[in-house]
Image (tube, helix red, strand yellow):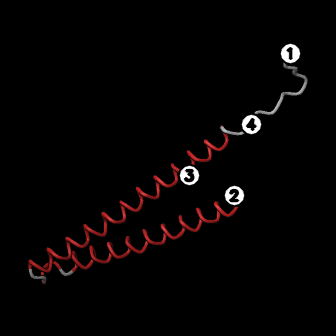
Amino acid sequence: MRSRGIALAAALSSAAAEFIGVIGVACGCLGFALEYYRPTLVYSTRAYMDHYRTLLGGIAIGALVVLGMYGLAARASKQHDRSNRTLQPTAGRRDD
C-alpha cells in the first residue's frame, strides 16, 4: 500500500512539473513575441498579450505553491504515521 502512495506522489509531482513546464514555455513565448513585435503591435494587442503573459505566470507560480504545499503535507503525514507506532520494549528492561 505504501509503494502505491509513493508511486501516486511521484506521478502527481511529474504531472505537475510537466504542467508548470508547459505553462512556463507558453509564458516565455508570449514574452518573447511581445518584446520582439512591440513596435509593430497595436496598443490593445500589446495589452492583451501582456495580460495573458501575466496570467500564465501567475498560474505557474500558483502551481508551484500548491506543489510545495502538497510536499509539506505529505512530509507531515509521514511524521504523523511514525509517531503513532506502538512502542517496542527495550531489550533487558523490565517494567516492575
Q: Residue beneath label 1, please?
A: 96
Q: Look at mark 3 in the image and give the residue it sits on.
A: 74
Q: Which residue is mark 4?
A: 86
Distance (Cα) linking label 2 and label 4: 18 Å
* First in residue order: circle 1 vs circle 2: 2
What amino acid does circle 2 point to?
Answer: Arg
> What's under tag 3, amino acid-wise?
Ala
Please tell me which residue is depicted at 25% across the width and 79% down the height of the picture.
Answer: 33
Residue flagged by tag 4: what amino acid is it? Thr
State how far apart marks 3 and 2 are (Cα). 12 Å
**Residue depicted at 53% across the width and 64% down the height:** 13
- Quadrant for residue 26, please give it: bottom left
Q: Nearest the camera: 43 or 82?
A: 82
Whichever of callouts 1 and 3 sits on the residue coming sooner in the sequence is 3
Mark closer to the chain start, 3 or 2: 2
Q: CA distance from mark 4 to mark 1?
A: 20 Å
Q: Which mark is residue 2?
A: 2
Left or right placement of residue 74 versus residue 26 in this view: right
Q: Amino acid at mark 1?
A: Asp
Give yes or no for contact between labels 1 and 2 (Cβ–Cβ under 8 Å): no
Label 1 residue SS: loop
Sooner in the amino-acid sequence: mark 3 or mark 4: 3
Rendered location of residue 4, percent (x, y): 67, 64
Residue placed furthest toward the top:
96
Quick one: SS at disc 4? loop
- The residue under the point 24% across, 73% down is 52
Residue in the image at 42% along x and 57% along y = 66
Q: 10 Å neighbourhood of mark 4: few (<14), some, or many (≥20)? A: few
Q: How would you rate the neighbour count of disc 2 (Cα within 10 Å): few for under 14, some for 14-19, many for 20 or more?
A: few
Question: Measured from the top left, where is residue 48 in percent x and y?
Answer: 17, 76
Judge depth for marks 2 and 4 and give the one in front.
4
